[in-house]
Amino acid sequence: MVEAQGLVKRFGEFVAVGGIDFTISRGEVFGFLGPNGAGKTSTMRMIACMSPRSGGVLRVTGRDPETDGSEIRRSIGLVPQDDALDSELSVLDNLHIYGRYFDLPRKEIRRRAQILLEFAQLGERADTKVDELSGGMRRRLTIARALISQPDLMILDEPTTGLDPQARHLVWDRLHQLQSEGVTLIITTHYMDEAEQLCDRLVVMDQGLIVASGTPRELIDSIVSKEAVELRLDPGDATGLVEGLGTLVDRVEMLGDRLCLYGKDGDAILEAVLGLGIHPISSFVRRAGLEDVFLALTGKSLND
Amino acid sequence: MTDVALSEGLFRLERHSARSHPRWMLAFSFWFLLYRRTWRGSILSTFVYPTLYLASMGIGLGGLVNQHVGTHSLSLGGVSYLRFVTPGILVASAMQIGINEASWPVMSAIRWQRSYLAQCATPLRVIDVFIGHLAWIALRLLFACAVFVGISAGFGVVQSPLSLLEILAATLLGLAFATPMAALAALFRGDEAFSTINRLLIVPLFLFSGTFFPIAQLPGQLQLVAELTPLYHGVALCRSLAGGHLLLWSNLEHLSYLLVLSSLGVVFGRRTYSRRLER
């Protein structure tokens, strides 16, 4: 569906995307994970044929955005980060005009709009001005709008940023449904749980480069150990602790004021810590996640 | 509950092969829809202001002028002041509509509502987005100018069928301002620049381009300056049409000036739009 080799985006001197390779197959949910400024949005805009690449090769649905942008966009649905809805128009008007951009017949647009309003749970809101919608409703409307052309490929730039937990789950639910329809989804996010929830495969981006790629599980297994123990310790207790635990611990990271120990068996690590006579102020054993992958790869936390 | 809706619906509908409206027309239809939802705000400027202007300038001020210089003074081209000033007001309003429609709406479509960005995610190209908006502005101008000429007919000042061509000429004048304005608006970072343009450019043009008095009244050098301004060419063209004169060399000159300025605006705007929307 999408193929990139050595893809580069420069703005003057600034390199937003510094030469990345990836392949996205039909029907897949593919994620770009990384902090703000990692180059995710620039990459999305290039895939959406809205921003010319500065170098490298890019093929979207087998064609070159440089020469066939308009034709490629016919089969893409874009959900931009800031929605770009017309707040002076009603929900239905927003769907209608977007369908017009794809030159769909009015009757057909009306038919699809009815289905999409249900899908987005906005059936009661058809005549409401976008101004009056909540953030979650706006986001669902943007997703519905992008679907009006029956796209093969959906690009969602931070689909749940700024939404409350309930609204997020509703969006995820809708995306899962699209996935089961066979729509290829490309998602950017800086939320770990979102990437683990939704993505079949993902790449981790930092400073314009891909620093790792694979399925969420592969990434976690290959880069960090299965479990993590987070400890908050009295100053001084940390010295010599790691040496004392020996082979139980594979890796150690500092997360702010917490010490994070990675290993196969979290409970065994915690037991060994207590066995050394150290009593942490607080302790917490959990499964390692993508957050830990990111920390291990870049030495920094995602939401810095 | 609604989980079935989509699977039974959207992706089972047959696909429609693309129809073949020119793509700029699809962008145009956005502005038309937006106008249908918000037209109330423009009633005043389209219908009421022209009437007020004609009444105050033409009849109020005109009465005074006619008393002093006579109703058929040669300095006004042998017509009453109302007849003299009507094409001036027509063209000056076209200028203001052209400037207004190409400033805030353009900035909003780029920065605030981001309607252009929504359009650029669809099969529309940047050139379609630009031309579609300009086509809408042209229609707005055409409508407003036609209403104005209609109202002035009510004042009894339309004497030649060529006045219908005034509608086209004033629309072109409006575009000669709108295309460069849209090109600039795409570059501006905030809307403060619009009021600067209004103060430093539009208001002086409005007052000194032969709108309310013949430029022969200006001192020699200022007269030359006035003759270089686009508004002067629009006013002169419309005034000559109102007087029933079509085939004059000077009309060709005015027409060419306005066509060239409009086209330069389109060429320039195509670049600034690309710079803003295709980064």
Image: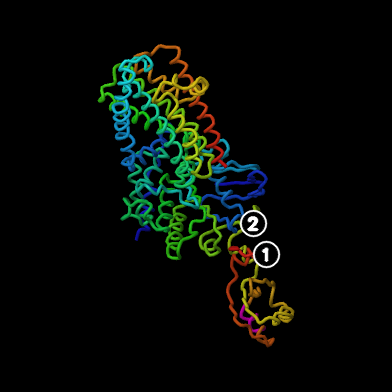
Whole-number angstrom distance, CA of label 2 to CA of label 1: 11 Å
Q: Quadrant of residue A46?
A: top right
Q: Nearer the viewer, residue B129 or B66?
A: B66
Q: What segment is highlighted magenta in the picture? A: A266-272
Query: Measured from the top left, where is residue B265 in percent x and y?
Result: 51, 29
Image height of A91 relative to B253, above or below: below
Q: Does residue B21 appear in the picture of this structure?
A: no
Which amino acid type is marked by label 2?
Asp
Q: Which residue is mark 2?
A: A206
Dots 2 and 1: beta carbons under 8 Å?
no
Please report whichever mark, 2 or 1, sits nearer to the chain's N-terminal start: 2
Q: Which residue is mark 1?
A: A299
Chain of the residue where label 2 is placed in the rendered structure? A
Q: Does residue A48 appear in the picture of this structure?
A: yes
Q: Quadrant of residue B45?
A: top left
Give the numbered dot on residue A281: none
Image height of A234 relative to A217, above or below: below
Number of residue marks: 2
Secondary structure of the residue carrying tag 2 is strand
